[in-house]
Amino acid sequence: MATTIKDIANACHVSKATVSRYINGSGYVSAEVAAKIATKIREMNYVPSATARNLSNRKNNVIGVVIPEVSNPFFGEVFKGISQIAEEHNLNIFYCDTDNSAEKEMKALAMLRSYEIQGIILTPAAGGMYKKRPSQEFIDGVKALNVPVILLDRDVPYVNWDGVFIDNYRGAYESTKCLIEAGHTEIATIAGDLSLMIGRERLRGYTEAMQAHGLQVREELIYPGDFTTKTAYNIMIDIIDSDNRPTAIFSPNNLTTLGILQGIFQKGLRIPEDIAIVGFDDIDVLTTLHINLTVIKRDNIKMGIEAMNLLYARMNETENAVNTEPLRIVMEPEIIYRGSEKKM
């Protein structure tokens, strides 16, 4: 006779409703209870759905990859690196896009629990849920997977998880320094989402570069953004129409750069003659269109490779190695000069 939810509930000494919430991700379940349920589901060979039954036949080679922006070219390149290593080890990938929504992220984690994945590569959403400290619901949701976790690009404070990151502070510092060395003193930035560590670190790099070179950090030149093209475009239009337009701008990510460029070209301005720009992250299509921007470049495919290699290593560790210190791989960015930083 097939195992039922009632069997799992009895074995864990919890209610059927609690087991149902865990399986469907429809409500809160503590990390301790979730881990107990996950263990019993495996031990008793419970299959919650036809889809999961199909996946359970190959559960030993399924991993989850959860990212926040499928439309962002950065994640497309990262996924190439992940896929390359996954294929080498005959691993199948369950791919989830959270659309930067904390609610969708929790649903994705619940779904991955029912599929009994063997590991997860995770870029946390920026759904207003984390601020400077992650929510307990998010932490419990990840821990309940009971598998190795590799953070990618976006760090999470106050947790001891492995991860692969870029030196966001250094990239922003070097971008701003580049504009300063070109002769600019009026340098603006459209800040990213400051609820994320990457947003805070890139803003810190900008402000400390200004201070290190004897320039005042002026609040009116720091515009609140959110790493999206639409917001950056609207802000850029306001910047161009202002009475005291800065001579240069540092963009904290590729989507912000696209919004800035949209505003610049719509207003008929030229780069760098009318305004200089340095962006964090390269955008290949711009070079094809002969829009030559100086950028902070990172090896996105290599980030994916490093994350997948680390996950595979963690998946194959012995039980005695589970409590080893988290491994934090921080890759160094490189500045690519193409002339858009110049002061004319």
Image (cartoon, helix red, strand yellow):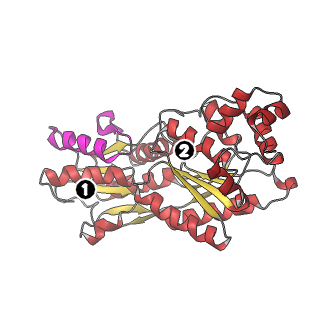
Residue range corresponding to the magenta coloring: 217-244
User: Which three-letter amino acid code belongs to the residue tagged 2?
Assistant: Pro
Q: Is 37 or 88 nearer to us in this picture?
A: 37
Disc on res. 124: 2
Residue at image x 41%, y 46%? Answer: 206
Reading the image, the residue beneath label 1 is: 276
Residue 51: horizontal and vertical position, in percent? Answer: 62, 52
Q: Is residue 276 shown in magenta?
A: no
Residue 31: horizontal and vertical position, in percent? Answer: 73, 34
Q: Secondary structure at mark 1?
A: strand
Q: Is 86 or 164 nearer to us in this picture?
A: 86
Residue 200: horizontal and vertical position, in percent? Answer: 48, 41
Q: Is residue 220 shown in magenta?
A: yes
Mark earlier in primary sequence (1, 2): 2
Q: Is residue 258 left or right of residue 304?
A: left
Q: Is residue 62 above or below residue 205?
A: below
Does residue 258 appear anywhere in the picture? yes
**Residue at the front extreme of this rendering:** 1
Q: Is 52 or 306 nearer to us in this picture?
A: 52
**Residue at the left extreme of this rendering:** 268
Instruction: Sort mark 2 into few (<14), some (14-19) or many (20+) by Cα contacts within 10 Å.
Output: many
Does residue 150 appear anywhere in the picture? no
Label 1 close to label 2 by CB (< 8 Å): no
* Quadrant in which the C terminus appears: bottom left
Q: CA distance from mark 1 to mark 2?
A: 32 Å
Residue at image x 37%, y 55%? Answer: 254
Residue 89: horizontal and vertical position, in percent? Answer: 68, 70
Q: Secondary structure at mark 2?
A: loop
* Quarter-of-image position of residue 291: bottom left
Q: Is residue 154 left or right of residue 339?
A: right
Instruction: Sort mark 1 into few (<14), some (14-19) or many (20+) by Cα contacts within 10 Å.
Output: many
